[in-house]
Image (cartoon, rainbow, N blue to C red):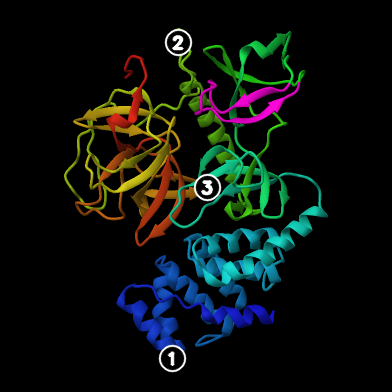
Amino acid sequence: MNRILLLVFLLIPLSAMPDDFDDAIAAYANADYEKAYQLWRPLAEQGDGGAMFDLGILYWDGKGIPRNRSLAVDWWKKSAEQNIAAAQYNLGLAYYLGAEVDRNVKEALSLIRFSANQGHDLAIDILPLVEQDFLRLSETETDKPLEAYTGANIGETTAKLYTGPSFENEVLETLDVGSPILVLKSEKEWSRVAIPDGIRLWVYGSYVRSNDNTTQVTGTGVRVRTKPTTDDSSVIVGTLPSGTVINITGVQNGWNQIRTPSAISAWIPNRHLRFASAADNNWQKEWEKLSILRETQSLKEIDIGPEIPTPKTLPQPTVAPTTQAVIQDPSNEPGIPIDTPQFKAATVSSTFSEVVDSPSESAQLLKLLAKGAPVQIVEEKDLWARVLVPTGLYVWVYGEYLSEDSGRWFINTDHVRARSQPSTDPNSVVLGIFSKNSDVTFISRQGDWKRVKSASSVTGWILIDQLAIQNSQAKN
């Protein structure tokens, strides 16, 4: 308990906030804790993450108010949900020590790692200790896979999976930060993981034979590759012995696409893991959602001819209503009529491509897509294409139009604008329109606005010369 008492008081964030926030910091510095409480309390109740954290500090030590450490933890939980690194660290430390909460090393590791990834010095210092303790405890428990999400360093939006527990191994897959994964085994600084719908790899068709309901490898030491070719762009990630049972998901030019067999493992650095909490009701939903998206994405990447129909599981975009409609948001701007667009399938042809909020070189970056990532073109304008991204984009909506019920976040009003920034000024671009009951993933909050992730209804812009358009007819 002494450790949390020593560390917690060092964590007053000095962020640039409204005058009341600055006045509260000044009052705290002058030991006028009652005034600090009176200033921080309304800000916290309005959703300010920094004020929530500082209010927890006052409750923890009983400065200016009666000491109530249970309430302090409650405020830190709310602040941590808004991605405040100091709150994640304090809350993680509370779970690690069992201070005012039941000891939970898994939850502590998740929170402290999240804080460390944001550069929090104390979290960085204590992270190795918590990791070692978690791995030690895991070894004495059952081998049941652990639910987790991918994380990344500051400024990164993707996490890489490798063929082995070393950065010298080949990259198997790149996932968006926040993607659900299963941790199968941990070793020192790495963990072996499974991902939704499995990783897709390739073997040459001559070495595959199907009998009844089973498909097996017939050659000895059959090479497994990342692409259906033997040129330098296709990396060998392992070999399969004769008799290995495989699951074929597609065919291209004599090659068979397969789900990752058990002989080939996917590994991720432990620092890029964020374990799901016991109370996380969204993990299974996210796993199932990503499984469908990845299955659809895999089928779209294979050029198997126009005679193969589009899979029924392909999500249908809802970028705009089918008739003109008046769109409203807090700005009370005039309505924006939007017509139904047409769609063309394409994939990213450059190593990386930027998805931006408008067709301009100076536009705001929304997301980076790797080569081969599928998109749907809904509009072409000069050198640019407006696209839907199956893995989703991060956008802002006005907070009162977003609701939560039993872990499900959804739009509660028809015709809600999705914006590139949390404001209605001219620099905040409308990226799409949400219809009522649209499902989204809540990310964070800023003032009256909330940031969400959506795999439909929102679009961005990509340079056309960075796309390979498929030879298919546009669809309504």
238 over 228 or under it: above or below: below
User: Tag 3: Cα neighbours inside 10 Å, few (<14), some, or many (≥20)?
Assistant: some
Q: Closer to the camera, 249 or 232? A: 232
Residue at point 71% right, 55% down?
A: 188
Q: Which mark is residue 45?
A: none
Residue type pointed to by label 1: Asp
201 over 360 or under it: above or below: above
- Dot 1: element: loop
383 drawn magenta: no
User: Which image quadrant for residue 250?
Assistant: top right
Q: CA distance from mark 1 to mark 2?
A: 73 Å
Locate the C terminus and report the quarter of the image it occupies: top left
- Dot 3: element: loop
402 left or right of 67?
Answer: left
Residue type pointed to by label 3: Gly
Residue with the mark numbered 2: 305
Q: Which mark is residue 32?
A: 1
Residue with the mark numbered 3: 178
Residue type pointed to by label 2: Gly
Q: State the extent of the magenta-drawn residues as a range.
A: 221-241
461 left or right of 78?
Answer: left
Q: Residue furthest left?
A: 334
User: Which image quadrant for residue 2?
Assistant: bottom right
Q: Are marks 3 and 1 in contact (CB under 8 Å)?
A: no
User: Which image quadrant for residue 249?
Assistant: top right
235 left or right of 467?
Answer: right
User: Tag 1: Cα neighbours inside 10 Å, few (<14), some, or many (≥20)?
Assistant: some
- Residue 6 place in picture, x, y as percent: 61, 83
235 drawn magenta: yes
